[in-house]
Structures are given as C-alpha cells and as structure tokens.
Amino acid sequence: MHGEKHSVVELRDIQTVLQELRNAVAAGEMIILVGEMTVEYDGRSFSWLGTGERVLLIKQDRSVIVHRPTGSEAVNWQPPGSHIDALEENSKLVIVSSRASPPEKLKITISRISHFHRLKLRDEAEFHMHAREEDMQQAILEEPGLIEEGFVIVEVERKVLDGFIDVLGRDRDGRLVVVEIKREKADTQDIDQVLRYSAQIEEEFGARPRQIVVAPLMTAKAAQKARMLGVEFRRLSPRRAQEILKKRKGLDRFLSGLI
Amino acid sequence: MHGEKHSVVELRDIQTVLQELRNAVAAGEMIILVGEMTVEYDGRSFSWLGTGERVLLIKQDRSVIVHRPTGSEAVNWQPPGSHIDALEENSKLVIVSSRASPPEKLKITISRISHFHRLKLRDEAEFHMHAREEDMQQAILEEPGLIEEGFVIVEVERKVLDGFIDVLGRDRDGRLVVVEIKREKADTQDIDQVLRYSAQIEEEFGARPRQIVVAPLMTAKAAQKARMLGVEFRRLSPRRAQEILKKRKGLDRFLSGLI
DNA sequence: GCCTAGGTCCCGTTT
DNA sequence: AAACGGGGCCTAGGC
C-alpha cells in the first residue's frame, strides 16, 4: 500500500484519534475503525441503532459505511462526497457525516475503539459485468432472428411518455412490435409495462403493435395475464445471450483477420 | 471485544493465513482483510474485477463483502450462510464462497495482505427506522380524518389479484375508497396501480370506488394523469405521519397514566 | 435538478 | 421454494 499508515489507538487518546481521523479524511485516505458505537440517521427517514460492536469504513471519497457483524448489507451509510466532521462529546468520539441535498445526517458515537487503520488503497482496475439485460438487448440487435424470422429493429430505448421501450421493431408483415426484455422471471408488472408502452405507440402510429416479452421465464400469473391480453413471450436467458455475443465476437475477430 | 484476536500476517505465511481463516470461519468470527486481490463472480450474472487493493469482510454469518476504496456500495458480495472455502493456488490465497440456490460462486484471489484481523463482535442492539410508508399507513389508521372528514377504515392490506390495497375505506357517503400510499413522490405507475386495484374492487363490489393517492408529492405527469382519470391526491409526508404517531403515543401514555 | 430503469439489488413476509 | 413490495435502496443515463 502506498503511503500506508496504521495504528491501534486507545480511546483515552481521543484527541489523537480525532487528529488522525481529520488528517486521514483531509489526505483522502481510507479509515477502518472497529469498535463500540451507536448510530443515528436523520434525513429521508430516520433511524436509531443502540450500542454494539461494528466496523466503520470511511472511504477515500468520504463515503461512510457501518457494518454490523452479520448481514451482507450495511446498516447505515452516507454516500460519497458528504461532509465529515469529527469531534469529542462527553468523552466519546463523534463522527458526523452530512450532505445538503437531500438533507441528511449520520451521527456515529464511538465509546470504544479496538482497531483503527488509515490506509491509502490503490485500485485502478476496471469492473466488468455480463449476463445483464443489456447483453440480452445486444444479442437481439445482432441477431434479430432471436425474436422471430423476419424481425427487424426499428429503434432502441425509444422514449415514450413515462419510460423507454427496450426494442421497437417490425415483424415480417411490417407490423410494429414492442419488445420488453427482462433478465429474470417476468411478472405481471412487466406485462402491464409493455402494454402501457404499446398503447403509446398505437396512439402515435395509429395501428396496434404486437407486444413481446423476452425473458428466461414468466410467473404463472404473468403468463395468464399475457395470454389473456395477447402479449407474446420469447424465451431467452441472459446467459444464452452472453454466449451468442461471445460467439459473434469470435466470428468478427476471425473475419477481420481475413481482411 | 470478547475473545478477540488480531494479527497482521505476511503473505509468505500463506499456510498460517489459511489456518487462521478456516479457524475464524469455523468459530463464527469476523474477518477483516486488507490487501491486493482479484474478484470473480459467477451466478445470477458474472463479473470480473482485476487486481487492486480492497477491503474484504467475512462476517460472522459467512456473508462476504468486498469494498473498493471508493463508493458506498460493495463491488462484490455473497449473502449470509454461503459455504466458504480457503485454499492456496499458485502461491496465492484463494477464498471461494458459494451457495446452491441460486447457484453462485465468488472467487477472491489474494496476492498481497496488508492487514488481517479475526474478531468476535457483540452487537445485540435493535435497529429502529421510522418515517417509512408503514408509518404513513399507521397514522391514517389512527387518524382516518387525514384522508378526509368522515372517512372510515374498512380493511388494510387487502389482497387483490396482483398486489395489496394499502387501505380500503368508506367516505362519509358510504362510498368505497381505494387508498394507495407512497413515501416519496408518486409517479404515473402509482396512478395506474390504484386504478388497477380499484377496477378489481369495482368488479367485486359492483360499484365504482373513489381512488386516493396519499404522498408528499406527485410528479407533474402523475398529477396530470390523476386529474384526467379522476384519481384524488392527499398530501402527507412520512415525516408528518411520524410526528402524528409520536403525539398520539404521548397522549396514550398520558391517558394510561391517568388510570 | 427531475425522471426512469436496472441490479448478483437485499430484506422481510406470506403462501 | 416462489411471489411480492419496501427501501435512506444505489447507480447510471437523459433531459
């Protein structure tokens, strides 16, 4: 770690911890603090968490995260860029993180510290994620036949009044098709959504489009609703979409190698 | 901290770290590890994160969390209860967390360790949160007049085909009222939702109910849609609901003190 | 700033 | 297990 410092500090050195904390925040360092604390939040809602032992992270972008000893989610947090204050109050270390918009404040009152680290972490790596809805969309753009023989793309992410149509296309008969893509099991709301979009396309183009939901599965209720309302279903999993894209990429490389 | 152990371990002691890790997991202790690592995830989607310095938490319930030096969200994680394996691979420490349903696997390959802690944290505190939608509902139940003079509750969380009606009531004229509560700004989908529920109530009771959306605000489009379709709006913020509840609680305490 | 949608969302609750 | 909705959701993208 570059310029790394670390130290274990007793709470009686509260002024030392305060100084370390302020210096670390000013220097854009990360802080890991383990200890006994209470946490209050006041903002979009408000919450109270009584005394217990937790892990506090203050990151290099001044985001603040409090983790309890169980659960994959942080119990309290403050997003990056917030203002951080540290002070002594009744012989306790108090950290206040606040931001103006939306107005919210996180107050952490620390009564015992068992670990305190300052660190400057270097992490320039890119994060790549695949098998998302976007990959399914991309696969359909590259192979419109996934929808059906003769399907052609008209527009992607077309804005309608209150949302975006994943794919707007035409079938072999020239009829408009509103396509809604779901990475996971499609539910009744997804059926509602494609119908909402379809109604707006109908109003605009003067002809009723077909509606197709693309997903690996549908809930039983969604399937029933879809049948009743004439919404069609095409099975496609994000995983298969990803495989299709990989194959095409390999093919592209091969073809460009030939030139 | 009770039974606390901590140690800073060099990666050359990889077998020692392995043993510490396994013992800690077996003992239900929490691990904090800071170091250089790559992270692969394969499951509901898949992701790749190249080498960089991060903070790894393995919690007492075997949830796994990887934090980068910025951002309030973890970059990779695995939920509580997963199975954790630790092994040596090409002179690196590899931690694999996996679960069967849904099938997913997180592989963390650690090439350098700068901090390693085992800790048993005690945290029995209850977490309380207020000013949520539930508080708004509760306030309406205790003071139906918040909806309007003469409003009475008929049923709460009534199940309809694809959802639950927050509050079903009757106005002073005995007409049914479908109430939909939103903690934040209500949007067009919320208008659709209350109309969908209302249609089902109409079918069941044979009379068209009124529809009321309770929220602190509405988006402009939602307001327009509501006006067009006869959906009414009552302004109520979660904050005010919470204050009303607090006042009533104080009053209850006062009255019970009188008995 | 508002609005909209995706996410390995997580989490609780109920069937 | 599946389904459903809330959440301080967070985050990204458009306008």
Image (cartoon, coloured by chain):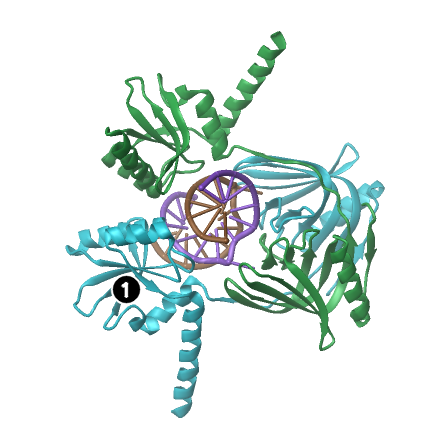
Chain colours: A cyan, B green, C purple, D brown
Give the image location of residue A190, x and y in percent: 35, 52
**Secondary structure of the residue carrying numbered label 1:** strand
Picture residue at 37% right of the left edge, 56% below the top? A218
Q: Chain of mark 1?
A: A
Picture residue at 43% right of the left edge, 58% below the top? A184
D15 shown above or below B171: below
Picture residue at 40% right of the left edge, 38% below the top? B185
B1 shown above or below B104: above
Q: Which residue is mark 1?
A: A155
Spot the residue most to the top. Answer: B258
Count of residue discs:
1
B140 shown above or below A125: above
Give the image location of residue A240, x and y in percent: 42, 70
Q: Amino acid at mark 1?
A: Glu
Q: Quadrant of the N terminus of chain B?
A: top right
Please tell me which residue lies in front, A96 or A112: A112
Give the image location of residue A116, x and y in percent: 77, 51
